[in-house]
Image: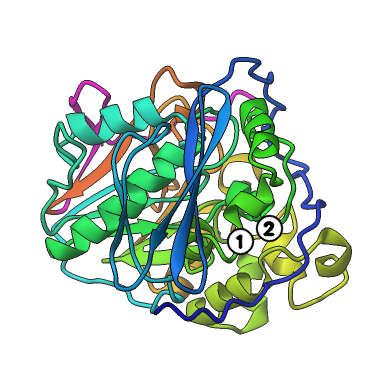
Amino acid sequence: MLTLCLSATGALAAGHERSPAATETTPTPSASAFDDGPYLRYTSDRIEARWVCDGKPVERSFPALRWPVVVPAQCGHAEPISVRAPAEAETEVSPQGVERIAALSDVHGQYELMVQLLQSNGIVDRKLRWRYGRGHLVIAGDVFDRGPKVNQALWLLYGLEQQARAAGGAVHLLLGNHEVMVLANDLRYVNEGYQRNAGLLGRSYVELYGPDTVLGRWLRSKSVIGQVNDLLFVHGGIAASYFESGLSRAQINQRYRDSLGTPKAVWQHDPALLPLYNGKTSPIWYRGYFIDPALTQDQVDAIAARLGVGRIVVGHTSHKRIGSYFDGRVIAIDSSIKNGQYGELLLIERGKFSRGTPEGKRLPLTAGEPLSD
């Protein structure tokens, strides 16, 4: 029998700010319909499942007497889902001695391109099963918004996490500003098709990822900042002001989990939450490595030293390709996958850094180009 103790993590309301320095642009809504789902919800003894197939809602339920519960494919995501027990908050660990690491960010619903990168670079096989062994895959935020296959991307990562763990590896999904925005009901960038499908299911879009849902509970267990070997991964970046709170990384991650969904009207007046969500220097929004002309090599070196890491790996700020900045201290991995045309995967294998292309080529990691705007 499944017993749940789910508590809200704050009111769900719009209001997360747009970063003043952001290069975000409002997407052109897609008018085309698409199959969607599953959306899975925990109840006391069952898993409730919903899909939109051929423009019509489909509902089924499955007994949850023991884990996992297998939910067969209906439409939308093409594979069965092996549903695990409700996720608990991640334990703060910094794995060391990992010989193979792959990282990408800002997928933004471009499922096919993400799959191509993972397959071509040996992370998953033709059947989308984990084949990276003891390697670690890091997703540095922003799976949500813009594209039409966010749900498929999330379910793929949900399944790969379990498969990687069984193989001695790991999948680390970090939250970016778009995950935070959606969980706070800021839906400015949600593909129009998802809004329509949510209406067909009789739910708001944010309710489809509520704390009583499988993916919603899983997302709320995740971190914003993670470390593997001497690499720190974070969606936006770490500004010097990050250290003013005096909190550890574990405490910062937990403060994010506890406050997800807090509306701007609350966090902008709360000195404990403002550093987590403000659009200039917070870890999910910061772009200073690329747009602050006053930021020096010594300052970035000092930030890394205080973090106790050799390099800081970030997404969020779009580039044409993966590149290194500040003499390799910062690596930018948002390679504009969101456009659905091209993207790259960062690979660190036995100490060698390279860029994996959609065709599986291994290109050298080189100095990044300055942003054009």
Q: Is residue 167 left or right of residue 216?
A: left
Residue 135: image location, x then y, percent = 17, 55
Label 1 packing within 10 angstroms: few (<14), some (14-19), many (20+): some
Find numbered disc 2 in the image and state the secondary structure of the residue it sits on: loop
Residue, disc 2: 281
Q: Is residue 176 left or right of residue 241?
A: left
- Which residue lies at the image location 17% right of the left edge and 35% below the top edge? 127
Q: Quadrant of residue 45?
A: bottom left
Residue, disc 1: 239
Against 95, residue 170 (above or below) is above
- Whether residue 301 is visible: no
Give, as a three-letter code, the residue at label 1: Ala
The residues tagged by marks 2 and 1 sit, at their Cα atoms, a distance apart of: 6 Å
Find numbered disc 1 in the image and state the secondary structure of the residue it sits on: loop
Residue 161: image location, x then y, percent = 29, 57
Dominant SS type (magenta): loop
Region rendered in magenta: 351-373
- Which residue lies at the image location 52% right of the left edge and 52% below the top edge? 235
- Whether residue 305 is visible: yes
Q: Are marks 2 and 1 in contact (CB under 8 Å)?
A: yes
- Which residue lies at the image location 39% right of the left edge and 74% below the top edge? 308
Residue 350: image location, x then y, percent = 11, 53
Q: Quadrant of residue 232?
A: bottom left
